[in-house]
């Protein structure tokens, strides 16, 4: 039902989306295999990157997801593994949000973004992630809000925009003042760190040295509880050898057309 709703109840679109969903599991193992949040590689990432969906919805019924780094001086995490966690959360939402939501609203906090971090996001990995997210998941992306902006953010947006459809590009909003975010996302569902009313954002968990956002902690525990389910899902993917006609490959789905101008990252 979630897929059908995300495809505006078009059966043909829904079938294509489901096909892509299981195809991606087969041909993009870097995103969809070894999905065990207790693995050291993934545990290291959740210390460096916070990406929890927030409880509560906007006045329009949208889910809000915050994505932010915690320290500009730490090394860039493994990008495919970080993207793997994003899709793990997406799969849990597909199972648990039975009644669906009106769409997703993303808040991207660029406070700790540096050129060194950005350099790890190559065109192939960015395109692969966006195709998986937009073509394989019943995502209704309503808004993207970028806060704590800097000149680097303009460079990043110019880098990503060629991969996005025009309607998506028109849904990206930049905020030099956090108060303008409240015109889109009600303060009552935002953590206190962003001037919201949802209570303190920090909770201490694990060792004394580790500080996790409360919502982040809840989601990481949820992903751990889903460990057996993720293991079972490894086998649920397309067998391209049995596909009528030409099997789908990474080159077919993610081939980069045209050329990219040289980016100057100072």
Image (cartoon, rainbow, N blue to C red):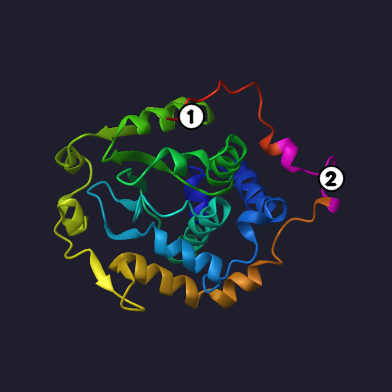
Please rate how many residues cluster around mark 2, counting C-alpha atoms within 10 Å: few if below 14, some from 14 to 19, many from 20: few
**Which residue is pictured at 52% across the width and 61% down the height?**
88
| In this rendering, position of residue 153 left or right of residue 43 | left
The image quadrant that residue 41 belongs to is: bottom right
Check if residue 245 falls in the magenta segment.
yes
Q: Is residue 54 above or below residue 12?
A: below
Q: Is residue 203 above or below residue 31?
A: below
Determine contact: label 1, label 2, CB under 8 Å: no
In this figure, which residue is indicated by the disc labeled 1? 159
Please rate how many residues cluster around mark 1, counting C-alpha atoms within 10 Å: few if below 14, some from 14 to 19, many from 20: some
Q: Mark 1 to mark 2: distance in Å? A: 36 Å
Residue span colored magenta: 241-252
**Which element is circle 2 on?**
loop
The image quadrant that residue 124 belongs to is: top right
Residue 229: % across, % down? 58, 73
Check if residue 34 falls in the magenta segment.
no
**Which residue is pictured at 22% across the width and 46% down the height?**
185
**Which residue is pictured at 65% across the width and 21% down the height?**
258
Residue 107: % across, % down? 32, 46
In this figure, which residue is indicated by the disc labeled 2? 244
**Which residue is pictured at 21% across the width and 41% down the height?**
181
> Which of 204/182 is in front?
204
Say which quadrant the C terminus sits in: top left
């Amino acid at each position: 039902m979630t897929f059908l709703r995300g495809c505006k109840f078009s059966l043909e679109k829904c079938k294509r989306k489901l096909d892509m969903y299981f195809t991606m599991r087969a041909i993009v193992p870097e995103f969809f295999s070894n999905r065990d949040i207790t693995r050291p590689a993934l545990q290291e990432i959740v210390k460096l990157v916070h990406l929890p969906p927030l409880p509560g919805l906007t006045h329009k019924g949208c889910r809000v997801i915050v994505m932010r780094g915690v320290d500009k001086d730490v090394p860039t995490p493994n990008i495919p593994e970080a993207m793997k966690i994003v899709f793990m959360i997406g799969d849990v939402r597909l199972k648990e949000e039975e009644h669906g939501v009106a769409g997703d609203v993303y808040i991207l906090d660029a406070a700790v973004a540096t050129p060194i971090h950005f350099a790890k996001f190559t065109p192939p990995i960015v395109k692969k992630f966006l195709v998986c997210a937009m073509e394989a998941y019943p995502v209704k992306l309503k808004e993207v809000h970028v806060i704590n902006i800097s000149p680097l953010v303009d460079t990043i947006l110019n880098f990503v925009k060629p991969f996005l459809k025009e309607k998506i590009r028109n849904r990206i909003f930049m905020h030099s003042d956090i108060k303008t975010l409240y015109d889109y996302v009600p303060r009552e569902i935002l953590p206190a760190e962003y001037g919201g009313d949802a209570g303190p954002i920090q909770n201490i968990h694990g060792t004394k040295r580790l500080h996790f956002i409360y919502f982040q902690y809840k989601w990481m525990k949820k992903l751990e509880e889903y460990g057996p389910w993720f293991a079972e899902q490894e086998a649920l993917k397309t067998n391209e050898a049995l596909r009528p006609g030409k099997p789908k490959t990474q080159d077919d789905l993610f081939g980069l057309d045209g050329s990219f101008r040289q980016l100057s990252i100072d």
